[in-house]
């Protein structure tokens, strides 16, 4: 098969299990499509696949950077495309798995990124509300969530780099590869319940200790200060919120992120959605395999 398979969707819907099954069936190798899973040590909070779960399948772009190393969307685009080429040259199927939509789009679509021109200002000393004011002072007609710091920074940096609004960027809409987009979904209330329980499981598995190990070393880099599960516990360690509030925020922010993911995927990708049968996941796998087999006939 010379196609690329993308498996995406919110946390807790079975992307990892599906990816292993599809890799076995279609002679595949898996490429990480999650921004936080790029980093070493950010394992529990990012729900990174464990070694024993890989079942001998080759995985790429997991744990390739220290948390204090820079890694941009430009780097991911370059690295992912290189892996796609290498995998296909081996006669195997690239399977991209993850929920960071912008990373996946940058790799598969005609996103033009110039390393020399990329602005990576983080504005760590500026509050979100002040960043928002600065953005709308430059880009008066932009519509953006005034509380979404990451999107505000991206839009602000884009304007400073290009001297026009990010909403005028029409690049990146042409798909460069023959790709099948698979999205896993379920009832929204069920999803939110699974997310809440997943956070509880992460805490049982040692999320608190994982985050504290970086906090104690006074490491305050982007993945730790922006990643869900990490930023909230950092706030707790800083004594700006209490423990219960931190856990509730992790759950709330995870649910909100899932909602934003759906919006991005539906707007940016030609997603084929499959409702997961959690009582018998093999039914979901079989349904998706039949769909892919039909696509391959075309």
Image (cartoon, grey):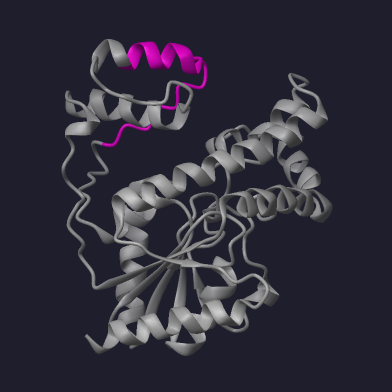
Q: Is residue 125 magenta?
A: yes
Q: Is residue 139 magenta?
A: no
Q: Dividing the image into 4 quarters, which one contains the N terminus?
A: bottom left
Give the residues in magenta.
118-135
Report the residue at 66% width, 55% height from top: 43
Q: Nearer the viewer, residue 6 or 294?
A: 294
Q: Position of residue 254 (x, y in %)?
A: 60, 43
Left or right: 38 as drawn, with respect to 103: right
Q: Position of residue 48 (x, y in %)?
A: 62, 60
Please tell me whether residue 287 is drawn above or below residue 130 in the rendered image.
below
Left or right: 97 as drawn, with respect to 158: right
Q: Position of residue 40 (x, y in %)?
A: 61, 54
Q: Nearer the viewer, residue 51 or 172?
A: 172
Instruction: Determine which quarter of the picture holds residue 138.
Output: top left
Q: Position of residue 183 (x, y in %)?
A: 44, 63
Instruction: Determine which quarter of the picture holds residue 52.
Output: bottom right
Is residue 1 visible from the viewing direction of this image?
no
Report the residue at 56% width, 81% height from top: 283
Q: Dividing the image into 4 quarters, which one contains the C terminus?
A: bottom left
**Total of numbered circles in the picture?**
0
Report the residue at 50% width, 43% height from top: 259
Report the residue at 61% width, 53% height from top: 191
Q: Nearer the viewer, residue 277 or 27?
A: 277
Please tell me whether residue 17 is drawn above or below residue 115 in the rendered image.
below
Is residue 130 visible from the viewing direction of this image?
yes
Q: Nearer the viewer, residue 143 or 90?
A: 143
């Amino acid at each position: 098969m010379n196609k690329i398979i993308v498996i995406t969707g919110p946390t807790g819907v079975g992307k990892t299990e599906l990816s292993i099954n599809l890799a076995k069936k279609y002679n595949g190798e898996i490429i990480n499509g999650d921004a936080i899973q790029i980093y070493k040590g950010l394992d529990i909070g990012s729900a990174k696949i464990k070694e024993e779960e890989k079942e001998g399948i080759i995985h790429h772009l997991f744990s390739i950077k220290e948390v204090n190393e820079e890694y941009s969307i430009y780097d991911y685009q370059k690295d992912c495309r290189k892996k796609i080429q290498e995998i296909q040259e081996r006669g195997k199927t690239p399977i991209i798995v993850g929920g960071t939509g912008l990373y996946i789009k940058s790799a598969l679509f005609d996103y033009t990124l110039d390393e020399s021109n990329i602005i990576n200002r983080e504005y760590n000393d500026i509050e979100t509300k002040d960043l928002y004011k600065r953005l709308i002072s430059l880009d008066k007609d932009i519509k953006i969530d005034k509380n979404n710091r990451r999107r505000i920074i991206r839009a602000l940096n884009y304007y400073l780099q290009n001297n026009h609004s990010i909403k005028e960027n029409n690049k990146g809409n042409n798909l460069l590869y023959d790709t099948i987009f698979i999205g896993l979904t379920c009832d929204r209330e069920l999803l939110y319940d699974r997310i809440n329980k997943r956070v509880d499981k992460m805490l049982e598995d040692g999320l608190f200790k994982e985050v504290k190990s970086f906090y104690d070393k006074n490491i305050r880099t982007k993945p730790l200060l922006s990643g869900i599960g990490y930023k909230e516990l950092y706030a707790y360690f800083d004594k700006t919120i209490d423990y219960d509030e931190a856990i509730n925020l992790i759950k709330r922010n995870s649910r909100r992120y899932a909602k934003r993911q759906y919006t991005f995927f539906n707007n940016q990708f030609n997603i084929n959605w499959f409702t997961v049968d959690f009582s018998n996941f093999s039914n979901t796998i079989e349904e998706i395999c039949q769909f892919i087999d039909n696509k391959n006939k075309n």
